[in-house]
Amino acid sequence: MSGSSHREREMENVHLAVEEEDLYSGYNDYNPTFDSEELENDVGFQQAVRTSHGRRPPMTAKFPGTAIGARPLATSFGARIPLASSMGRPMTGAVQDGAARPMTSVRAAGYTSLTRGSTFDPLGQSRGPAPPLEAKNEDTPEEKIKILEKKVNDLIEQSCMAQSVGALQLALDKAKEAGRKERTLVRQREQSGNADHINLDLTYSVLLNLANQYANNEMSPEALNSYQVIVKNKMFSNAGRLKVNMANIYVKQKCYPKAIKFYRMALDQISNAHKEMRIKIMQNIGVVFVRMGQYSDAITSFEHIMSESPNIKTGFNLILCYYAIGDRERMKKAFQKLISAPLGIDDEDKYIPSNDDTDSGLVIEAIKNDKLHTMERDLKVLTEKYIMTAAKLIAPAIETSFATGFDWCVDMVKSSQYVELANDLEINKAITYLRQKDFNQAVETLKTFEKKDSRVKSAAATNLSFLYFLEKDYDQADRYADLAMTADRYNPAALINKGNTVFVKQDYEKAAEFYKEALRNDSSCTEALYNLGLTYKGLKRLEEALECFLKLHAILRNSAQVMYQLAHLYELLEDPQQAIEWLNQVLSVTHTDPQALAKLGELYGAEGDKSQAFHCYYESFRYFPSNIDVIEWLGAYYIETKFCEKAIPYFERATLIQPTQVKWQLMVASCYRKSGNYQKALETYKDIHRKFPDNVECLRFLVRLCTDMGLKEVQEYATKLKKAEKMKEIREQRVKSGREGSARSRREGREGSAGSAGVSTPVLSSPKKAGVIPEMDVKAESKLLSPLLDSGRDSGRSSSSTKGERLSAKMRSLPGSNEPYEASSPKEIDASYVDPLGPQMERPKTGAKWRVEDDGFADEELGDDLLPE
């Protein structure tokens, strides 16, 4: 009890604080007097507007005012007096919706706590959504014109986009449609009376786009007409420069005088402020003069450009013009201007990241391969190409000898900003010696690089290795390949040359390692991949070889060598259909290759398709009528099909190719005999007898023909036949006795050596056992060193004699004297075909490139090139 009473006494001393009014309350109160949006619904306001109600004196507090709806007002003391002014403005200290405002400054200014009224809503969200916008009336002429303008702009944009993706016809259609829409738009403006507000920019855009699309679609007259419409309209400002486009069209049409006229007209209408544009037009004028053969006028344009704004391309064209007129001194001056022309690109050092600043290193890494740097690299490569080409062009012309002129160019380049090109120029000097068949000078020039820096030394050693490889000096080729690898181990060309020197020694495993290393250093090295496929082929690893050549075909889609190798591999894998397919692809690239046609004919013949085989062999004979195997097959085909008279021209051609081979002349006579022309057959046999009087087969047929025809010469030929047969028997007996005697002497020698005691005979070790590499036979050597692709035209001619000699094993002997006329049936001729192209394709590709220039530009092929890339 004591505790509770103590708490009660304490509570008696506690006084609760009186809640004071909020000084800032009522600030957000809403007074409808200031609501301008509700004035339309305010009866008092509307009455005041219509009448003189607003000019009446204010009402007293006793009578509530009607203008503001008798709003109850109150003082700060709470006395509620309905007091209002005639204009609806609350009096000072008036109570707004029950909120009391102090009338004096005893308390701080502000509103009391809100008792009633609206909440804070500055955005007016409580009034609900805004009313919808009024819908545009599209039927009005102005709205129709705006919609049509938008359609025209959209069509122009679609036309440009179609052109950018190569859809030229679609781009032209869109441009024409835009032109039609634009004309409709102009008519609508004229009808609505707004002809003064025609959009000239839109009309200009439509006409220019239409003219460009006509030009892109090679519709020159229409394009010229469209450009002429723009140029003649004086309302279009700066339209005169479009005459450049018209001049370009005249250049395509080879109307060079008109082109120069329009270029000059455009040049007159372009101010000097547009210097770059004027330079480009003058460059075009110079090029057109070159095409017309007016080199003096072209030189005037190019010299003006080189004095105002020198650039690499104009400098190169100026050198060509001086070379055309044979001005030595000016050629030298132009070359000096060429190598001093600014490139306008920064040094490559700015792309080397620094180890200190990480942020700048990241930036450099990001811009190292961007489009701008790629453009700079391409410009630099083009500049070097122009300088190299110009030096090679003028070197023989500016001095008394080629070497002196080239040395002058090298000295000029060494004193310019292109110092690195000096070594490349000297290597090109060696290549020029090679073209002039001066191999000694080429070798001497390349040997001077042995003491240069590693890059140049590696390139020179690579070329020397390749030269010695072509000369079959494989030891020197191997030495210089090792030197090139020592100078630059990552040089794929040096690795390929090293692999080739091992390849010719038939050490295929080791050669494959070098080719693989070259591919690791440069995955795009097609020579290494090709040679690796040949290596696997030599190792009988046909599946791996097939994989290599399929990869190579993906890189070189139109390489006939690669496709032939694929066909040969499929033939070795016993898949003739695939081989035929690949050979057809070879012929799609090289339509007139006779060896590929002959090979395809062989495959068709093996498959039993004689008609296709005949077509291929016939085409092969048409392109190269000196292939004995093809001639033999065609002759046998006509004999088999009982058209012996058609086989005669083929055997006669074989007689011309191999006049010492009697079998072709006998086949001609046999064809005459089988076709029933016995008189011609008799004459042919007599002619053969005069050339080969000891030929027994010819005499037998002469005897039989003379007997059947009742001729008197039968006894003479019979006597000669007996004599020839007797001589033949004697020769055969001599050969037989000689063979038996040699065999008997060898047998006695072995018995005598075995029976002799104490006499030791030295045993000579064979070259293989002694560790000496046996020499390659001619056939194996030709596999490696014959040309890769030109075998159909060159090597076929050189190998015709050897192929003809092999036919003696294929042709059977003609019938004897006691056999009937038809004994030499078509089956006696073995028309089998030995692959003429296969061995000649088996050469590894060298790791260097021999660049053959035409008009100063290099055409690089997959064959035996000299300079490494």
Image (spheres, rainbow, N blue to C red):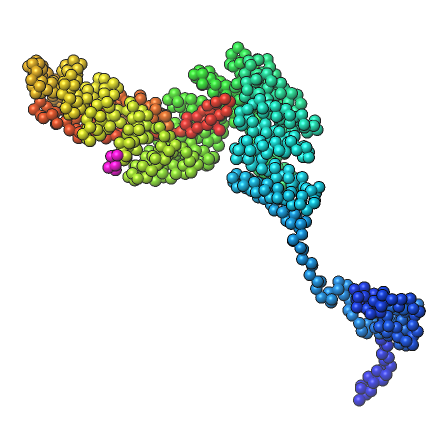
> Please, is residue 362 above or below residue 405 in the view?
below
Residues drawn in magenta: 606-611
**Percent position of residue 228, x then y:** 61, 31
> Please, is residue 71 above or below residue 711 in the view?
below
Q: Nearer the viewer, residue 14 or 572?
A: 572
Residue at 86% over, 72% down: 66
Residue at 71% over, 41% down: 196
Q: Nearer the viewer, residue 754 or 606?
A: 606
Magenta span includes 609: yes
**Percent position of residue 307, x then y:** 66, 21
Is residue 539 something one can see in this rendering? no
Is residue 791 something one can see in this rendering? yes
Q: Quadrant of residue 862?
A: top left
Magenta span includes 527: no
Q: Quadrant of residue 43?
A: bottom right
> Which residue reaches farthest bottom?
1
**Percent position of residue 521, x then y:** 47, 35
**Percent position of residue 619, x then y:** 31, 28
Q: Quadrant of residue 315?
A: top right
- 463 left or right of 69? left
- Quadrant holding the N terminus: bottom right
- 77 left or right of 482? right
Residue at 80% over, 72% down: 117
Residue at 34% over, 26% down: 791
